Image: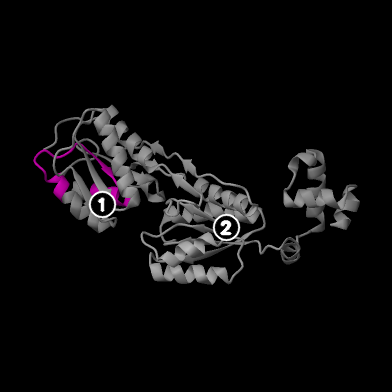
Amino acid sequence: MKDIARRAGVSVVTVSRVLNGKYPNKVSDETRRRVLQIVEELGYRPNISARALRERRTYQIALVTPSIDVSFIAEVVQGIQDVAMDLGYSCLVYVTKSQPALECWIFRAIAGKNVDGVIWLPGPTREKEVDRAARALPLVQILYKELDDVPAVLVDQVQGAYAATWHLLSLGHRRIGNLAGNDRHGRQRLAGYYKALEEAGIAPEEGWVRFVPTSWDGARAEAQGLLSLPNRPTAVLCYSDVVASGVLRSARENRIVVPDELSVIGFDDVDFSRYLDIPLTTVAQPKHELGELAITTLLRRIEGEAIEDRVLIPRLVVRASTISPHREAG
């Protein structure tokens, strides 16, 4: 750093501020460009171990998540990693498989790793020991808020389903079914669906709302019952894009033409949804932004800042699977 400072004609403190990204208003753009150019010419790389020892940090964070084998979580992880790498942090990833005992063991293991903080995607159930361990570390929850006194970065699931339902209402649909997930997000999305229908003065008929397994096969089987109703819906809002793809298959097997006879909306906007034979209208959760915001929020908490919850708003992505109802179904 002394070599860089000498060649740039600045102080070592200025070089440190450029490399650490701290106090950006105290370094001019011209100075920053000059320092970074010399850094590149000299091939300088900060000694993270020395920096960690000096600042009493490990420059490691942990991510605890039920899974990473779906593209939704993978994009969140990518957002976390992109920011972590830019700031000189590494991220340890722990997968709980939605098993409370394993999640508990992981938190005990993390305590021995001396990580600076944890990003936690809570599983559907947990043991009390996890609550105690989570509160012992700088921690940020994502997607679900399980601990009231710990900050969370969330996505407004109610608003996402509300917007999707109003999209169908605006197209002229009045018979709108719902294949819902029986979990925390599923119930929130169902609330958004009911809210929109109530505002439109519509009450769904019996059988139009069904709780479905979140797997493709389970959704396809449940969709068979929905599409076999004498007064079946002309549109259906699905818990996820996976569930929606199961509905598309079931509709094809029942010779129901999508979107002419049945409009379909998914949720999440995972990669495959745009590449289906009928590109899927869906509610896009800001996955990469969620990861970015989670780690920046965690780093602020590590610095001792008081943090409030952050709620991101999903957006509706309209594709070919939804149009105005052309004729009565059934």
Q: Residue 138 carries which label?
A: 2
Q: Residue 246 carries which label?
A: 1
In the rendered structure, does residue 237 fall within the stretch colored magenta?
A: yes
Q: Closest to the observer: 145 or 281?
A: 145
In the rendered structure, does residue 127 fall within the stretch colored magenta?
A: no
**Mark 1 and mark 2 residues within 8 Å of each other at the beta carbon:** no
For residue 230, which quarter of the picture? top left
Residue visible at 15% across and 44% down?
207
Q: Closest to the observer: 282 or 186?
A: 186
Give the SS element for disc 2.
loop
Check disc 2: other Cα within 10 Å, few if <14, some if 14-19, many if 20+: many
Residue visible at 79% across and 59% down?
44
Q: Is residue 93 above or below residue 273?
A: below
Residue 186 locus on image (x, y percent): 31, 48
Q: Is residue 312 above or below residue 55?
A: above
Q: In this view, does 80 lie above or below 309?
A: below
Residue 212 visible somewhere in the drawing: yes
Left or right position of 291 against 276: right
Residue 149 locus on image (x, y percent): 49, 51
Left or right position of 22 against 228: right
Residue 323 visible somewhere in the drawing: no
Give the distance between the C-alpha atoms of the residues marked 1 and 2, in whole angstroms. 40 Å
Single out the mark in the foreground, 1 or 2.
2
What segment is highlighted magenta in the picture? Answer: 225-249
Residue 96 locus on image (x, y percent): 43, 66
Q: Which amino acid does label 1 sit on?
A: Gly
Q: Closest to the observer: 296 or 309?
A: 309
Left or right position of 18 against 269: right
